[in-house]
Image (tube, rainbow, N blue to C red):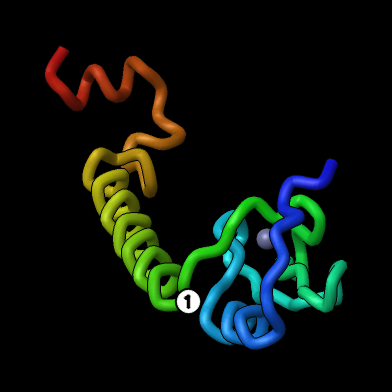
Amino acid sequence: MENNSETFELLEAQRMVRDYVCSTCWDGLYYAPGPERRYYVRCVTCRHDTVGFVTKHYANNCRLKSRGEAAEVKEMLKEAGVINNPHKGKTIEEINKELGF
Ligand SMILES: [Zn+2]
């Protein structure tokens, strides 16, 4: 299915490739000749399924943000004992005994 048949002037296409990345996977873009001496701009990975574009600046910001959030979640899980669970390998009885039951 052709989701993105929008075409651009050559200069526009070149600028898109330089400044934008795929909005789905953040991979780089390329341009390919389309009808009427205009150009398609597509993701190198999604190709014909390219849904849209975001600026590289935006993508970098999102990447940094999600990396920060991932670190935070890891800390939270560690605190909650999900990672490096100190009770790992203990039976319910042993844990209950430790807790004073
Ligand atoms: Zn893509």
At x 66%, y 75%, the residue is 28
In the image, residue 23 sits, relative to residue 78, either above or below, namely below
At x 38%, y 46%, the residue is 83
Residue 1 appears left or right of 72 = right
Q: Position of residue 50 (x, y in %)?
A: 70, 55
Residue 49 appears left or right of 101 = right
Q: Determine if the C-beta at disc 1 is less than 8 A from ligand 1.
A: no
Residue 21 appears left or right of 94 = right
In the image, residue 39 sits, relative to residue 76, either above or below, namely below
Q: Residue furthest front?
A: 36
Q: Where is residue 24 in the image (x, y as percent from the top left)?
A: 59, 55
Dot 1 lies on which element?
A: helix
The amino acid at mark 1 is Lys
At x 39%, y 69%, the residue is 58
Q: Residue furthest top?
A: 101
Q: In which quarter of the image is ligand 1?
A: bottom right
Q: Which residue lies furthest to the left in this view?
A: 100
Q: Nearer the viewer, residue 52 or 5?
A: 5
Figure quadrant of the N terminus: top right
Q: Nearer the viewer, residue 10 or 46?
A: 10
Residue under numbered circle 1? 56
Q: Nearer the viewer, residue 11 or 79?
A: 11
Q: Position of residue 86 (x, y in %)?
A: 32, 42
Q: Nearer the viewer, residue 50 or 82?
A: 50
Q: How many labels does the image show?
A: 1
